[in-house]
Image: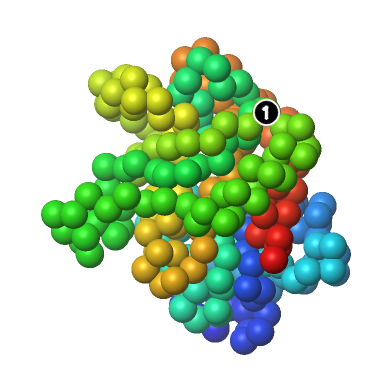
Amino acid sequence: MTVHIGAKPGEIAETVLLPGDPYRARWAAETFLKDAVCVNQVRGMLGYTGTWKGKRVTIHGSGMGMASMSIYANELIRDYGAKTLIRIGSAGAMQPDIKVRDIVIAMTSSTLSTPSKGIFRELNFAPAADYGLLEAAVTAARAKGARTHVGGIYSSDVFYDERPDLTEVLQRHRCLCVEMEAAELYAVAARHGARALAVLTISDHLLTHEALPAEDRERSFGDMVEIALTAGLAR
């Protein structure tokens, strides 16, 4: 038991999927896991452990933003022995060839600032996914026939952006999409010797302004969850 996670020792699996929204964690657990049990409700951040195709997995909310992700990733790895952490969440497309409902698998994640910045100080650390996870996710996405894009993304530390100039620079440098957690997840996992990946569903588009209605999001996120489960439990 930690400050933010009330699970008992042994109740968290070595493979953890991390949606930001705790209610999405509940939906994913009820939809995809067998014999799912709620192992955490502290501060309303829901976590469930069950099995998928006979393999044990936890689906646990991470909250919104890199500060929240840092708390849960650190505690899951250090205190509960999580070894594989995969963010599953929504993102905003930044390129014209990426469509709403497409899958993005994040090879790297650029950012202006993360909770880890104080550790790196003047170093521009490059947060990157675990290659084995990335390769497994790409293979799983192709097997499902999902429209998939692989490359660099942007993790923003603000939701209401006031930097259109930065958005233009990121688009020019082929940044695929924007979200709010992956860069810190990659940094924390690297620090503690864990594997990390972000598998994202495009829920809205910065160029076309198209967006999934709230009621359609969960139905559109099924491919992402299955890809993450397949990649995370591949070995």
What percent of the width, then of the height, locates residue 97? Answer: 55, 17
Q: Is residue 35 left or right of residue 102?
A: right
Visible in this render: residue 27? yes
State the residue in front, 212 or 143: 143
Pick whichever, 63 or 111, lies toward us. 111
Q: Is residue 195 above or below residue 114?
A: below
Which quadrant is the N terminus positioned in? bottom right
**Residue count near mark 1 (Cα–Cα under 10 Å), binned few <14, some 14–19, many ≥20:** few
Residue drawn 56% across the image and 41% down it: 105
Q: Residue at x 64, y 47 (%)?
A: 137
**Residue at the outermost bottom position:** 9
Task: Name the residue type under label 1.
Answer: Arg
Q: Which residue is mark 1?
A: 147
Q: Secondary structure at mark 1?
A: loop
Q: Is residue 24 visible?
A: no
Give the image location of residue 168, x and y in percent.
32, 20
User: Which sits in the foreground, 24 or 129?
Assistant: 129
Q: Is residue 86 above or below residue 152?
A: below
In this picture, residue 43 sits left or right of residue 163:
right
Q: How many marks?
A: 1
Q: How is the image coloured?
A: rainbow
Q: Is residue 172 left or right of residue 12?
A: left
